[in-house]
Amino acid sequence: MRKREDKVNNTKKQKRKFNKKKFFITLAIFWAIGTVITVVSLYLVERYVISLSGADTHAEEKESKNNNGTKKINISKNAKDIQYSFDNKYYTYLFENKVYIASLDNGNILSTIDEEKNITYYKLLYDKNLIVYFTKVDNGTTATLQLKTYDIGTKRKIEYNTFTVKNFSKIKNMDMSPVINMIYINVEQKNGNTTNNIIYKINLFNTMSQIKSGLIIDRMIMLQHTDRIYYEDSNSNIYYSNSKLGIFKEKVNMIGIDTDDVLYFITQDNSKVYKVKNNKITDTIELKDKDVKATYHNNQRVFLIYSSYVIEVSADNPLKNVGKIPDKVTFEAIKLDKMYVRLDEDTIEQIQLDLDKIEYDSADMVNGQEGTSNTTNNTNKTNNDKDKEEKDKVEQTTIDKTQDDKTKDEDKDKDSNEEDNNIDNNDDKENNDDDSTVDSDSRGDS
């Protein structure tokens, strides 16, 4: 009997010892599982709270930009004819007589320009967040136009000139120099089956004057540091002021201007790009790829757009591939080192480009606002060019309000035009005999 009890007691001791070991093993397992569950739960809660606060926007943006330097942005489906700010902060568009200003960070509408009169045209400047726009009132066959500006940062409106145009149809394009406070606009007139274009010169502090009429003008570029306008008619004839530019031996199309007021022209077979300064060819760029889809300039750089890549012909290395274009997209614009392409009606993509840096002159001030239009690429400047540019700035930056100054300007333009006519008189006949049409597929709007 005692032996049996001892045996039972020994068995209980063994079970008690075995259960204690099992207990610790079980405890360790549950502790490990609990730790994993707690860590995972805290991580998910943290991500949820951060997402509610919006603090992860920068992280997502950074991750998106690190992916080949691209960023997708949702935009309004109503956004047509989009324009992008020089600093890549805003995009703008005109819809139902309102100009909308939206954020390029998240696509949200920030403000609008709302006018009782019809907004017939607007343009976001290339070097500051200032919108220049025109309102219109119809008076029978005559339209009254008024020039206004809107500062995106301060939301301040300023009203300028009011003028009338007979048989007004639309403003085709506008170019402005914030350096000399001059604006040129190309106005389309229609009277029955007759269409005519007129270039007007607008002095912000004075009045306006007519520069050219009687042509169909497809493209217009003004110098930024000197009061001179270049334009191209529907027969690919190039003009400056009222004279033809007779320096080319073949038909070319005007495509852009850079920071040094150098003009760029491309041959109609897309084989060469000419650089022109002071009405003289200063350089010729032989293109390896003639399959140019479009061209683009932003008054600072000049680009050729191909189906899958982009080159900057205004750079030191003009044939360098500076960016890739994805398949099945529509090119829209380039601002600083960012390119914009449209993926679909409500999505655009921002793509990082590999561009050489350019320096901005912070001393350039226009109407009390800091401008960045006077950019320089030091490697492209000679000492003579710098001296001439400084001289042009001193002579042109301030425009007086008096009528005497207006008369002086008109006399100066007249003398300049007479001189230009004498220089190019022998070349006009050659240009008049050549009437090939514009290859619209090889050019893009700025």
Image (cartoon, rainbow, N blue to C red):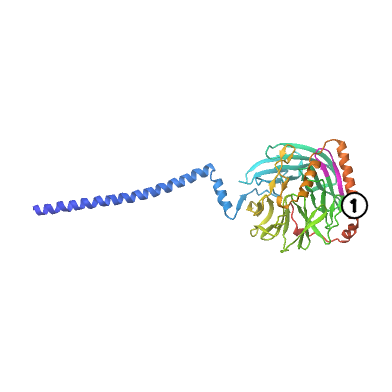
Q: Is residue 390 visible?
A: yes
Expressed as whole percent of the image width and height from the top left, the position of residue 335 reads 68, 49
Expressed as whole percent of the image width and height from the top left, the position of residue 254 reads 79, 55
Residue at the front extreme, as displayed: 383
Q: Can residue 84 be seen in this view?
A: no
Amino acid identity at mark 1: Asn
Placement of 102 over or under 430, stated as above or below: above
Quarter holding residue 439: bottom right
**Closer to us: 351 or 54:** 351
Expressed as whole percent of the image width and height from the top left, the position of residue 3 reads 10, 54
- Image point 36% across, 50% down: which residue? 32
Q: Left or right: where does residue 127 sit relative to residue 405?
A: left
Please report the bounds of the magenta region as a residue range.
201-212
**Closer to us: 253 or 156:** 253
- Disc 1 is placed on an element classified as helix
Q: Tell me the residue that label 1 is attached to.
A: 421
